[in-house]
Amino acid sequence: MMHRSILAIVVGFAVTAASLAVSCRTTGTGENARIERGRYLVNHVSLCFLCHSEVDWKREGFPPLPGRAGVGGLWRDESVPFATLYAANLTPDETGIGSWSDAELDRAIRRGIGKDGRTLFPVMPYNAYRAMSDSDVAAVIAYLRSLVPVKNAVPARKLPAAVEVMLKPVEVMRPPEGRGHYLVQIADCFSCHTPLNPAMQANFDLAFGGGFIVKGPWGRVASPNITPDPSGIPHYDEAMFIRLMRTGTVGGRQVNGIMPWGHYRGMTDEDLKAMFGVIRALRPVQHRVDNVEEPSKCPKCGTTHGLGKRNVR
């Protein structure tokens, strides 16, 4: 989801270098293959253009407006009321990344450090991207440099001084072992499907248990519980999961487009199956969340969402 928690810390996994052979596969050789891998990651896995584009909020799946993919602009999530945030222009124009070195882009993606040395606001999910492999970061950068340059000067963010001093970069971590774990990590499923605690940090006790609130042109939405607990999605099978990611429908119901199925639908069946294998094996978390029922205060996560009052500590 847009998916990105305010100060969430991403779950770490034990890893081995051998995992890269599985998670970083590309077809073909050379620069074209690298660019195609980057295109796949940017558009369908890590969803860079969901935030770094001018988006058509009226169309199914919330696609970028024609010619405005990657140009940056105002961040529309109203659940961060104390900040005015702008996603950077990612095209290779002088107003975008044209003057950035590969090392500076890598540093921003995986450590959260901007060209000017300031720590990026963690709505940019460097907490998740810090586990991206060297080859995949290189592919993302190669793809961004292949875009048509678009002139679009993006304003600087506006944050309270007290928040500015709290922002800290992260260290790069080795990629999780296994294709599914790697994809769940760099797709940042954790941040969207995990509620925040009173300190505005991810509530690890409810990891993947839903209840993270996003508010904007899409409405006010609480992320669902995606664990195999009876209050989550134990009834999902592989086919249902893939159908949701391809069509945005489950049980005849259209899900809100802020669950970015309109972008994930471009993932391969192999990758979606690997992700579902990880989701199906998550630790069950008892947490009822709904976006149809009248919102009520949830004593378990502290937010207000449908079926909230039916939860207990």
Image (spheres, helix red, strand yellow):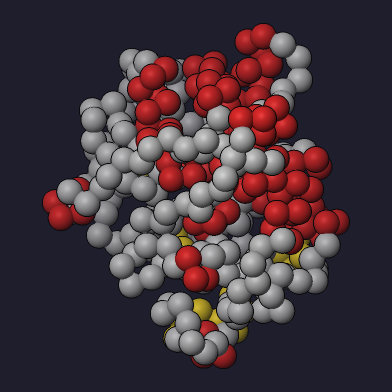
Q: Check the image and report above or below for 263 versus 302.
A: above
The residue most toward the right is 239
Give how far across and how far down residue 145 sits, in percent: 49, 17
Give how far across and how far down residue 154 sits, in percent: 31, 33
Tell me the quarter of the picture where residue 162 sits.
bottom left
Residue 171 is at least partly visible in this image = yes
Q: Check the image and report above or below for 50 versus 152.
A: below
Give how far across and how far down residue 153 sits, in percent: 31, 28
Which residue is pictured at 52% across the width and 71% down the height? 206
Give how far across and how far down residue 239 sits, in percent: 85, 56
Q: Nearer the viewer, residue 150 or 301?
A: 301
Quadrant placement of the N terminus:
bottom right
Which residue is pictured at 67% across the width and 34% down the height? 19
Tell me the quarter of the picture where residue 78 sits.
bottom left
Residue 52 is at least partly visible in this image = no
Which residue is pictured at 55% across the width and 81% down the height? 306
Which residue is pictured at 72% across the width and 61% down the height? 281
Q: Check the image and report above or below for 28 versus 194.
A: above
Q: Nearer the viewer, residue 4 or 50?
A: 4
The residue most toward the top is 30
Is residue 270 left or right of 7 when viewed as pictured? right
Report the number of numbered marks. 0
Is residue 31 left or right of 213 when viewed as pictured? right
Q: Check the image and report above or below for 56 versus 81.
A: above
